[in-house]
Image (cartoon, rainbow, N blue to C red):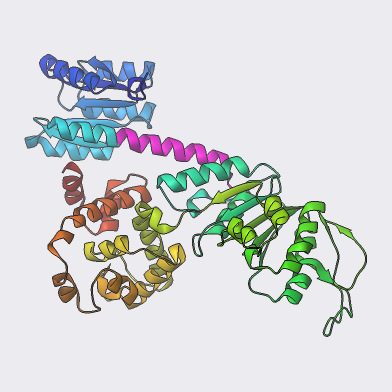
Amino acid sequence: MSAKAKTTVLVVDDDQSHRTILLALINGWGYAATGADDGAKAVALAKGKPFDLILMDVRMAVMGGIEALKEIKAYNPAIPVLIMTAYSNVESAVEAIKAGAYDYLTKPLDFDVLRLTLERALEHISLKAENQALRERLVSAFDPRSIIGRSPAMRRLMDMVAMVAPSEATVLVTGESGTGKELIARAIHANSSRRNGPLVAVNCAALSETLLESELFGHEKGAFSGADKRREGRFMQADKGTIFLDEIGETSAAMQAKLLRAIQEREIQRVGSDRTLRVDVRIVAATNRDLKAEVEAGRFREDLYYRLNVMTLPVPPLRDRAEDIPLLAMHFLRRFAEANRKTAKGFTPQAMDLLLKYDWPGNVRELENAVERAVVLMAGDFVTEKELPLGVIEANGLSETSSGQAASQREPAMILPLEAVEREAILAALEVTGGNKTEAAKQLGITRKTLLAKLQR
């Protein structure tokens, strides 16, 4: 049985011929459609069976669609309801949206638009259910919304985090610089049995070998010049919790040997001491290097690699999840606008087009910096291409000129992708606002009527 065949749709229309046509169409698309000729019957059916979606006319003899909608949403607010109305009765559509309808369609129906809207509504509800399930698995100690992304790659990653976090397994988080590896490490710790213990992070690339050994394992008084008292290292600080070894691929061969013992035996020695200390820590490491290639090149210990590589979580680069760029950009825009006490409504289509076409070698960190720069420089309510970094502009074949000049340098073929840019911006706004079209319209700097028209198209 296909996934669609399990999806139930209730069609409510007192026009028998129109209802029959809709039932035939929707069943033909692979869904399981049921009919009702009145709003009161629709309410009774909805209370008796959890339909996945309801398609309902506004004007019906006994109970109208708006009244039925209110009763259905009061009983089960999770059911998406699509309202059908005549062109001359748009006021009813507005009332339906206020009452909780997912969307409205105007009669005579465009069946292609109907199918697209129906699929979009079901996909939206499916994503909400998926996100809710993930939130239940990722406990409140770490808000999953801190990790922003609706792309398939990010959803797969968060599923893996949810599975790995409760275990005691050592985890290796891989990915390019700026992809958010530490954020994933924090999510793992916050959703583990060690969440009440400390999470201690160490940047292995930031310290020399001598300083790193002291930082990790501690030292005795007099162990070296300047060691005027005993110091506990990061491993001991992380006892009963998690230690995050960032950029572990940058460590020297000697340090790798000492780390191997600490990870394998959970034993350490302070610098200048012969005493062995037991530690109870979970290891999460991260690297932007290909450790397998480093092993083959003789630059990384094979035994340490296999100790670290119990569970590997690859964080995708931003260029491989372009669907997340509008969402991330809007998130950073709101944050930096608030920090700089500015009013920022969004990005112009041209600016968003440049963000989407850029490869982002610095990944999310580079995007964050680009948006912060744009917020500082912006003079109006919207970020334009003029405020974006020169590298982003030049990578798209434009020079840093006025917006009019930049736009004039676009090739005709770049006109079409703007529709896709607009679509992504709208979807991102709806995702951020949880499907609230009024709030999404405000975020986009357009009227609700304009947003609905764009969604209809």
Q: Residue drawn 17% across and 30% down?
A: 84
Q: Residue drawn 68% across and 42% down?
A: 167
Tell me the quadrant of the picture where the C terminus can be found: top left
Residue 415 in magenta stretch:
no
Tell me the quadrant of the picture where the N terminus can be found: top left
Residue 132 in magenta stretch:
yes
- Name, please, the residue furthest toward the front: 297
Q: Position of residue 299 (x, y in %)?
A: 65, 65
- Name, please, the residue furthest toward the right: 274
Q: Main secondary structure of the magenta part?
A: helix
Is 28 situated above or below 232? above
Q: How many marks?
A: 0
**Magenta-drawn segment:** 121-141
Left or right, 446 with respect to 227, comes to left
Q: Position of residue 2 (x, y in %)?
A: 35, 22
Left or right, 151 with respect to 381, comes to right
Question: Would you say residue 137 is visible in this rendering?
Answer: yes
Q: Position of residue 453 (x, y in %)?
A: 16, 46
Q: Position of residue 21 (x, y in %)?
A: 14, 18
Question: Would you say residue 100 is visible in this rendering?
Answer: no
Is 101 situated above or below 218? above
- Nearer-the-camera pick, 149 or 208: 208
Left or right, 171 with respect to 49, comes to right
Is 354 situated above or below 2? below
Query: In which quarter of the view is residue 162 placed?
Result: top right
- Nearer-the-camera pick, 40 or 184: 184
